[in-house]
Structures are given as structure tokens and as C-alpha cells.
Image: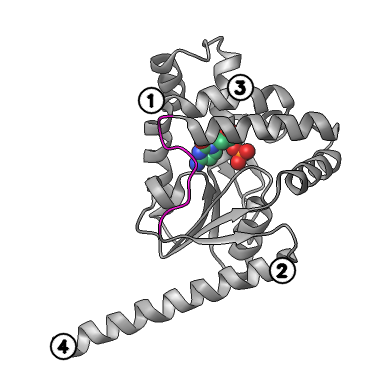
Amino acid sequence: MIIAIDGPSGAGKSTVAKAVAKKLGFSCLDTGAMYRAVAWQAMQSGVPLDDDAALGRVARDFDIEFGHVEGDPVPRRVSIGGVDVTDAIRTAEIDRAVSPVSAAPSVRAALVDQQRRIGRAGDYVVEGRDIGTVVFPEAEVKVFLTASDEERAHRRVRQNVDRGVGSIDYDEVLADLRRRDEHDSSRATSPLRPADDAVRLDSTDRYIEDVIDQICSAARGAEGAGAANDRGGTSER
Ligand code: DC
């Protein structure tokens, strides 16, 4: 089963995706980390951020790997070309570089391919911007998670404080978040938008546990419906 969680940055996708994966025993794929890793590698390699073909080569030539601790379905580390970039991809510099990189059609083509290969290997919660619309339009559960701009900026500042990386200036974080939303929503290739059949959840004034429970219930419902369909198919034969 695939549970697709899309939405703007800071809506709580990562927290929700990880918790849902743990509760259901699914694996978890953070596609934003893949775009960030390619942005990091492009900067290391001196690739201009407006060179679509060269960025596409970076996305194809450098392997992105997620590191697991035994028994935990949620990966803890991410590496590209064998270099651990878990912390390096969370800086303000990468926040800025990742917008043009994720808008490059060659990069998207390469990463969407990889995401499909990973997700089809098992039960996955996949979070990103285009998971329900482009990567897995057939996902059994689709969620579009939002929150107010101000709430998202507060959360991002708290996250940066906890991680010890990224800006902790609220106004700067808010401005950057709005700039990235605008960029993600208006780009030509796979813009951020809810799939027609996505459940829209606003996490601004809700306990995150509520949101997590709602998604788990939807997944169990979808699993039950799938099993019933399978049984129906068998009895007709
Ligand atoms: O979720 P995030 O902030 O780590 O994502 C980093 C960037 O990658 C963000 O600018 C949006 C982009 N992205 C995308 O275009 N498509 C995805 N499936 C995931 C992320």
C-alpha cells in the first residue's frame, strides 16, 4: 500500500509521515530529502543551478541512499554518492538552492523514477509535493496537509532550534517559506497542488496525534476495502 502525503513546507508532513509509518509498520520515504541531496551535490560539483541537463546528470549519476537502524522503518540518515549529508541538506543555503533544482525537469524525471522503484518494493508512506498527483496517482490513501503560514514558520523555527541548523529568525523563515511555496506552486513541472481525490487536512489548530490517527484509520479502511474486493474477485471465479 502507498500512503501519499503532500503539502507545503512546514505543514507537518515529516512528523505525520514518520508517526503513521511507525504505527502501521510501513517504511517511509522523504522525497524532499532526495531533492535536497541533489542540490547539495550540484553545489559541491559546481553545477550551475539553471543547467537542466547537467542537474539531471547529477540526479542520475550519484546514488541516494537512506540509512536504517535495525528494527526502525523510518530512515535516520541520507547519503549521496556515499557521503552522509543528513545535516548538510538542512541549511539555509540548501533551502535556497533546492527550489531551482526541484524545478528542473531532468531532475524530476530521474528522482520520480527512483521514488517509484523504492515505493513499489513494499508498504510505504511517501511525503512530498507531487506524490498523489504524479509519482503515485494510484496511491490507496492521499492526503494534502496544510497549516497557516504563521504556524508553519513557527514550527520550522522550532525544528531548526532542535536540529541546530538553519535560520531561527522567524521573519526570515516566514519570508523564505512563502517564497518557496510560491515557487513550488507556480513551476511548470509538477506544481504543488492537491490531487482531486486527496483528503485535505489543515493541521493549524489540531493535535498532530489526531491527524496521525485519521490517516491511520483511512489506511485501515482502504486495506479493508482492498481485501473485500479481493474476496469478491475470488468468489466470482
Ligand atoms: O519537503 P522539503 O522542504 O524537504 O522539500 C525540499 C524542496 O524540494 C522543496 O522546495 C520542494 C521540493 N520538493 C518537490 O519539488 N517535490 C517533492 N516530491 C518533494 C520536495
The tag earlier along the polypeptide, 2 or 4, is: 2
Q: CA distance from mark 2 to mark 4?
A: 41 Å
What color scheme is it?
one colour
The tag earlier along the polypeptide, 4 or 1, is: 1
Q: Position of residue 31 (x, y in %)?
A: 53, 42
Amino acid residing under circle 4: Glu
**Is the residue indicated by label 1 positioned so its CB lies within 8 Å of ligand 1?**
no
Q: CA distance from mark 2 to mark 1?
A: 37 Å
Q: Looking at the image, is 60 positioned above or below residue 215?
A: above
| 113 magenta-colored | no
Amino acid residing under circle 3: Ala
Q: Looking at the image, is 11 positioned above or below residue 212?
A: above
The tag earlier along the polypeptide, 1 or 3, is: 3
Residue under the image location 68 percent in, 59 percent down: 203
* Residue 166 visible from this viewpoint: no
Magenta residues, start to end: 188-196
Of circles 3 and 4, the one toward us is: 3
Quadrant location, the N terminus: bottom left
> Quarter of the picture for ligand 1?
top right
The residue where tag 2 is placed is: 209
Q: CA distance from mark 3 to mark 2?
A: 33 Å
Q: CA distance from mark 3 to mark 4?
A: 55 Å
Q: Quadrant of residue 181?
A: top right
Q: Looking at the image, is 87 positioned above or below residue 203?
A: above
The residue where tag 4 is placed is: 236
The residue where tag 1 is placed is: 106
Q: Are marks 3 and 4 in contact (CB under 8 Å)?
A: no
Q: Is residue 53 left or right of residue 155?
A: left
Mark sitting on residue 97:
3
Q: Position of residue 134 (x, y in %)?
A: 38, 45
Q: Quadrant of residue 166?
A: top right
Of circles 2 and 4, the one toward us is: 2
